[in-house]
Image: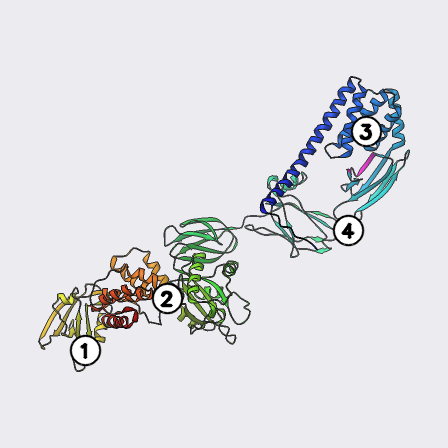
């Protein structure tokens, strides 16, 4: 049974330190050994020069023992001279047999060794005898001449004569494109060993490639054979580089490819941002093929970017390149996504850059929804997010864009969300996993994912039915929203797509022409009856009072309120009107007044509105400078939109910043009533009561043509009184 022993973190750190120290100790030990051996040999040399043979032998015994115990590549070259010096010292002490033994060891270690300096005839005779008995010749003639030849693992020339020790050896000959030959042999004393005309058998073609620049992928017959690495190549490529007109310093190292069969081949040279090159050689024999250096030309386009907003970030394929306006001259050939981003919106354009092209991007930033998921009843063979992006590319008020698929997959995985987490049908019924996502969670997710993709909202696309795969439903969530908008389109119907685009592009008007009064139609009356007059409006200043009946405007009969509304439509602020009226007693009267603009407000219960789209639009408008009244009207509409998607806390904050005058229509009373609703939803009943009491004392309406807030507020106050907690 295996026992697992867990090592504490400190122990693991100590263990790692021990390993590092051990490795360092090994390196230092090798350096120390070489230093010690050199020191011993130097000591022996000094003693030998003084004819102190005893100390010479003593130092060399230690040196030779150290080298033989650990024959490192750095220490081994010292061994022949150590044997030589010790042998001569032994001869000097009359120990001829021991000296001969060292000469034999020397001959075996270095068969071509030549005794240096002046040597006595006696010692030279012994050395010659040792050589005759222990060293012979190896004569090599090998083809091809540039083959790699290893004798007992050491590199030797492919052709020529070299001394070798008598005994068993192994000769290994190899070259790329040839079958390797390994041949053991025994070298005998007094007779040369001849390896004559050893010709390697060709087994494959060999192609050698050099490119400028390095890093070029070589693709042969559709199969990649790697990339060229940084150079320089061997010196023999200098002439080839000159012919190709390429500086040698720009060339890569050689990339070798083997095993191409006989026949025609297509060789492609590929590198991002460079024009591809191609060669079509025909292999008619097994041989080496060395191509001239392949030079690739840059393949770039120029992109000039402007934006409708200052300080806009410019990104290409997700990489930040600077701030608009700017020109980028090194955009690689091929498809790219050009993006412009700011806190208020986004613009993107997919381009296919061609070499030498000059591309102009004039971006208009709009609030953006990031398409983060796509789902359906069966496996989808296309990215529907890109389909939706294309279908809605003509939008003028918002942008729908599909981030890279790997980025959205990573984001959904991090949140542990399936693809159908935001799937709804055209009636806004939750499908699949979407039914399991609580509203609060959906609101949190919309906030986080919008922030992650630098968007003002998120979206998904769903195929609700397998029976009609071209009918798609897009769900939209503004950042922080928990209640989606849904919009359906049919890919088989261009008209359906146009209608969907028109619906999303439908804008809000924050003001409408007004006379500052409320009029109603009464049976058997020849004109609308004025029931309320804004005390600060132009009608009050003209002396018009509740109970007056409007008969004409600019001499045009006004039989009912519908005609009055049509007459005012399209009028501009401060435009003059002459009114014919009669008072309560029936006396005729005239009044000169002017048109003024009164606020408009979306309905809290208007289900026809695309509230999430309105949300991102209103948030964007607030970032622009506006007069205080316009700012307040935008915030009032924003508060209603926030309430519609369940974000009452934020709606309450926006309402507290609204400043409108009192009067008929949308005014201060409307704000008080909505503040009461927001306070009630957030648990502040005392604040709700105070707000509703303020609203009950006004003549304001819920919307421009809605119910009086006085009636609505009084009903809410009665509801508070009926609550047990209020007593």
Work out how far the residue at label 1 is from the one at label 2, CA to CA, in angstroms. 43 Å
| Above/below status of 289 relative to 234 | below
Q: Are marks 3 and 2 in contact (CB under 8 Å)?
A: no
Work out how far the residue at label 3 is from the one at label 2, CA to CA, in angstroms. 96 Å
- Sequence-first disc among 1 and 4: 4
Mark 2 = which residue? 646
Q: Which residues are magenta?
A: 155-162
- Sequence-first disc among 1 and 2: 1
| Above/below status of 154 relative to 63 | below
Q: Residue at x 64, y 57 (%)?
A: 222
Which mark is on residue 559? 1
| Above/below status of 173 relative to 503 | above
Mark 3 = which residue? 113
Mark 4 = which residue? 203
Q: Main secondary structure of the magenta part?
A: strand
Determine the residue located farthest toward the front in the rendered image. Answer: 727
Mark 4: secondary structure: loop
Q: Is residue 194 left or right of residue 217?
A: right
Instruction: Tell me the mark number nearer the camera, choosing from 4 and 2.
Output: 2
- Sequence-first disc among 3 and 2: 3
Q: How would you rate the neighbour count of disc 4 (Cα within 10 Å): few for under 14, some for 14-19, many for 20 or more? A: some
Which quadrant holds residue 656? bottom left
Quarter occupied by the N terminus? bottom right
Which quadrant holds residue 683? bottom left
Where does residue 440 sit, x and y in percent of width and height? Answer: 42, 65
Instruction: Tell me the mark number nearer the camera, choosing from 1 and 4.
Output: 1
Work out how far the residue at label 3 is from the one at label 1, CA to CA, in angstroms. 129 Å
- Sequence-first disc among 3 and 4: 3
């Amino acid at each position: 049974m295996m026992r697992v022993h867990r090592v504490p973190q400190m122990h693991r750190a100590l263990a790692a330190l021990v390993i590092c120290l051990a490795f360092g100790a090994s390196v230092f030990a090798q350096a120390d050994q070489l230093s010690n051996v050199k020191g011993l040999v130097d000591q022996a040399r000094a003693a030998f020069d003084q004819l102190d043979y005893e100390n010479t032998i003593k130092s060399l015994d230690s040196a030779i023992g150290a080298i033989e115990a650990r024959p490192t590549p750095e220490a081994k070259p010292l061994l022949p001279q150590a044997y030589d010096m010790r042998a001569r010292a032994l001869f000097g002490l009359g120990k001829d047999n021991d000296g001969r033994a060292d000469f034999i060891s020397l001959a075996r270690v270095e068969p071509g060794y030549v005794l240096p300096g002046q040597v006595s005839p006696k010692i030279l005779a012994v050395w010659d005898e040792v050589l005759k008995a222990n060293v012979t010749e190896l004569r090599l003639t090998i083809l091809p001449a540039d083959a790699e030849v290893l004798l007992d693992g050491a590199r030797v020339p492919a052709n020529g004569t070299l001394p070798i020790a008598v005994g068993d050896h192994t000769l290994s000959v190899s070259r790329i494109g040839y079958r390797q030959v390994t041949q053991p042999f025994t070298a005998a004393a007094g007779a040369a060993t001849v390896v004559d005309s050893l010709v390697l058998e060709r087994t494959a073609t060999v192609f050698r490639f050099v490119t400028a620049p390095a890093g070029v992928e070589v693709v042969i017959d559709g199969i990649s054979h790697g990339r060229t690495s940084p150079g320089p190549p061997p010196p023999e490529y200098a002439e080839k580089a000159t012919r190709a007109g390429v500086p040698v310093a720009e060339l890569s190292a050689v990339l070798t490819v083997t095993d191409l069969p006989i026949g025609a081949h297509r060789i492609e040279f590929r590198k991002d941002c460079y024009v591809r090159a191609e060669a079509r050689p025909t292999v008619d024999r097994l041989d080496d093929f060395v191509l001239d250096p392949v030079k690739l030309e840059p393949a770039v386009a120029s992109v000039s970017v402007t934006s409708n907003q200052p300080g806009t970030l410019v990104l290409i394929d997700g990489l930040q390149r600077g701030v608009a306006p700017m020109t980028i001259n090194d955009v690689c050939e091929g498809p790219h996504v050009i993006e412009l981003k700011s806190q208020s919106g986004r613009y993107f354009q997919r381009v296919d850059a061609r070499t030498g092209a000059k591309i102009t991007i004039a971006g208009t930033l709009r609030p953006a929804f990031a398409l983060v998921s796509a789902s359906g009843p069966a496996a989808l063979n296309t990215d529907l997010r890109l389909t939706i992006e294309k279908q809605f590319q003509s939008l003028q008020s918002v942008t729908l864009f599909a981030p890279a698929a790997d980025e959205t997959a990573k984001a959904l995985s991090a949140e542990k969300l399936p693809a159908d987490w935001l799937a709804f049908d055209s009636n806004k019924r939750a499908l699949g996993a979407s039914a399991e996502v609580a509203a609060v969670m959906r609101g949190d997710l919309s906030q986080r994912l919008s922030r992650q993709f630098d968007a003002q909202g998120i979206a998904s696309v769903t195929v609700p039915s397998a029976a009609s795969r071209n009918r798609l439903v897009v769900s939209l969530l503004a950042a922080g929203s928990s209640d989606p908008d849904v919009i359906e389109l049919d890919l088989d119907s261009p008209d359906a797509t146009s209608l969907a685009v028109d619906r999303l592009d439908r804008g809000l008007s924050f003001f409408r022409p007004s006379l500052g009064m409320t009029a109603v139609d009464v049976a058997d009356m020849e004109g609308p009856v004025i029931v309320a007059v804004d005390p600060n409006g132009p009608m009050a200043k003209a002396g018009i009072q509740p109970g007056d009946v409007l008969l004409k405007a600019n001499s045009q009969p006004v039989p009912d309120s519908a005609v009055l509304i049509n007459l005012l439509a399209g009028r501009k602020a401060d435009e003059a009107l002459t009114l014919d009226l009669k008072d309560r007693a029936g006396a005729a009267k005239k009044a000169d007044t002017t048109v003024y603009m009164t606020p408009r407000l979306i309905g809290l219960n208007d289900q026809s509105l695309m509230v999430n789209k309105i949300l991102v639009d209103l948030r964007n408008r607030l970032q622009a400078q506006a007069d205080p009244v316009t700012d307040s009207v935008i915030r009032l509409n924003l508060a209603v939109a926030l309430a519609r998607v369940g974000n009452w806390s934020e709606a309450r904050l926006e309402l507290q910043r609204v400043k409108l005058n009192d009067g008929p229509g949308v005014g201060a009373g409307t704000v008080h009533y909505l503040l009461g609703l927001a306070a009630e939803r957030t648990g502040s009943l005392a604040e709700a009561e105070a707000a509703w009491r303020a609203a009950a004392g006004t003549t304001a309406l819920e919307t421009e043509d809605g119910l009086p807030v006085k009636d609505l507020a009084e009903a809410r106050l009665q509801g508070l009184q009926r609550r047990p907690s209020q007593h």
